[in-house]
């Protein structure tokens, strides 16, 4: 059986574990860095406090984290009948560029999930908000259906009002559905990392929520490098695996942006690479396959550089990670680009061989999720269950606002 067949036949039921509701953290600790961290290294499990992470990391490590910022992606409109329609912005359509769409005035289009869509049969929705003392009317018009989502065109008056301002005034932070509660005022800060500054995510890269300015400063004092990349987290991160086998699950696609200088540094450095969060892991590992495409076709188009779901299991890995990364640097230099911009659908599951990442900081993930598969691929199929059993037996808190893991 080929590697692809082996991975595609993995049963998601084998990645299940009991998660009582009371073990799901509904809020973070008042002091983020005081949460527990489970360290798995050399086949051994240890328990620490997160503020100790800088001294637990390998000397001269390179810490790489996702600087994306969660937007107020959930918008609520009221019909004259009293029905509530919820619109959840997923990704930009027109303009397609994240930076441009947030700067847009008057009109833009997003791909959105629509709650209570049966009540929205036709016509535009309208909602009034006050921005800078001026009453602004926001209209939402439903367009083409794409899968379980719709293209929604938003239009508004007020010549200087950007869509970023509209979201800040009308939208709310979309906390994970498994928290089973409404968004609260505290989530406006709790659900953002201290280093977030690139708008675009509809879910936080939650492994980074444990970091404080003090912990980052201690990393600096210890000579641990800190670098940033961007992956805008989509709602697909919460998408459950509904199929029996992994092969029947369609992995979500996400936008990534990595500075050319970081890729160049990785291509020559021997420093241990520690990724903060599964989004950083997927971004960094995707770079290897981008570089592999460029190895055989240096003049490929941007669309052809897209990392597809099963690429790691169908493409022979015949070049080193350093060569793959150097291929990207050469590609960017030929195009005069300062960042690699692309998309990834990468599925990391047991059978996957890590190419870039030497360690990761992450949270405890949902049962039967693709994120748990990613962890199992790193620590081993036997060890992931041992780790999670230990966490359940030692009162660790789970999911987005819960405790952390350090895997080396």
Image (cartoon, rainbow, N blue to C red):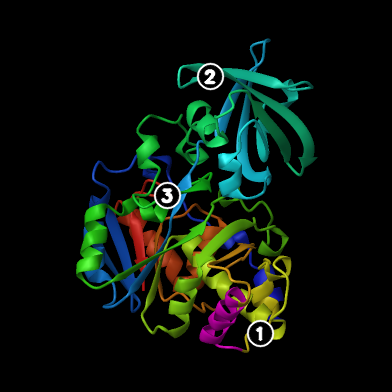
Q: Earlier in the sequence, mark 1 or mark 3?
A: 3
- From this viewpoint, is residue 46 visible? yes
Tell me the number on the disc at residue 129. 2
The reply to whether the magenta stretch includes residue 25 is: no
Label 2: how many Cα within 10 Å (few below 14, some 14–19, many 20+):
some
Q: Is residue 379 above or below residue 26?
A: below
Q: Is residue 323 above or below residue 65?
A: below
Image spot of residue 108 (x, y percent): 67, 36
For the image, the number of numbered tags is 3
Q: Name the magenta segment's main secondary structure.
A: helix
Image spot of residue 157 (x, y percent): 62, 23
Residue visible at 71% across and 74% down? 5
Q: Is residue 42 above or below residue 259?
A: below
Residue assigned mark 3: 197
Tell me the number on the disc at residue 284. none
- From this viewpoint, is residue 396 visible? no
The image quadrant of residue 302 is bottom right
The answer to whether mark 1 and mark 2 are in CB contact below 8 A is no
Mark 1 residue element: helix
Q: Is residue 266 left or right of residue 312?
A: left
Mark 3 residue element: loop
Residue visible at 44% across and 64% down? 385
For the residues marked 1 and 3, what is the alpha-carbon distance in whole angstroms?
33 Å
Q: Which residues are magenta?
A: 319-333
Q: Earlier in the sequence, mark 1 or mark 2?
A: 2
The reply to whether the magenta stretch includes residue 326 is: yes
For the residues marked 2 and 3, what is the alpha-carbon distance in whole angstroms?
25 Å
Label 3: how many Cα within 10 Å (few below 14, some 14–19, many 20+):
some
Residue assigned mark 1: 295
Residue visible at 66% across and 15% down? 79
């Amino acid at each position: 059986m080929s590697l692809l067949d082996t991975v595609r036949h993995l049963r998601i039921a084998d990645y299940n574990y009991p998660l009582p509701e009371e073990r799901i953290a509904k809020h973070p600790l008042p002091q983020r860095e005081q949460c527990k961290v489970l360290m798995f290294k050399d086949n051994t499990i240890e328990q620490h406090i997160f503020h100790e992470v800088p001294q637990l990391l390998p000397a001269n490590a390179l810490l790489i984290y996702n600087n994306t910022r969660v937007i107020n992606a959930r918008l609520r409109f009221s019909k004259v009948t009293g029905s509530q329609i919820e619109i959840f912005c997923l990704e930009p359509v027109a303009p397609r560029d994240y930076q441009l769409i947030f700067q847009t005035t008057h009109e833009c289009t997003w791909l959105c999930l629509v709650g209570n869509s049966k009540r929205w049969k036709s016509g535009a929705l309208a909602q009034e908000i006050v921005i800078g003392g001026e009453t602004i009317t926001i209209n939402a018009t439903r367009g083409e259906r794409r899968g379980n989502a719709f293209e929604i065109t938003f239009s508004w008056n007020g010549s200087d009002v950007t869509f970023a301002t509209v979201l800040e005034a009308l939208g709310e932070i979309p906390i994970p559905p498994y928290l089973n509660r409404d968004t609260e005022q505290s989530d406006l800060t709790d659900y953002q990392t201290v280093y977030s500054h690139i708008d675009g995510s509809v879910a936080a890269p939650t492994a980074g929520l444990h970091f404080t300015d003090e912990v980052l400063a201690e990393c600096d004092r210890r000579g641990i490098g800190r670098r940033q990349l961007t992956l805008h987290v989509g709602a697909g991160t919460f998408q459950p695996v509904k199929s029996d086998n992994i092969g029947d699950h369609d992995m979500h696609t996400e936008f990534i942006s990595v500075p050319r200088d970081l890729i160049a540094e990785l291509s020559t450095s021997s420093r241990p690479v520690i990724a903060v969060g599964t989004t950083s892991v997927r971004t960094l590992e995707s770079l290897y396959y981008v570089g592999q495409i460029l190895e055989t076709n240096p003049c490929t188009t941007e669309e052809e550089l897209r990392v597809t779901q099963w690429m790691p299991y169908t493409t022979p890995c015949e070049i080193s990670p350093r060569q793959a990364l150097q291929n990207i640097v050469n590609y960017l230099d030929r195009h005069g680009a300062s960042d690699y911009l692309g998309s990834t659908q990468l599925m990391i599951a047991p059978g996957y061989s890590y190419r870039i990442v030497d360690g990761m900081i992450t949270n405890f993930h949902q049962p039967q999720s693709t994120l748990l598969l990613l962890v199992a691929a790193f620590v081993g199929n036997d060890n992931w269950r041992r780790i999670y059993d230990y966490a359940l037996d030692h009162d660790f808190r789970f999911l987005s606002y819960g405790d952390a893991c350090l895997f080396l």
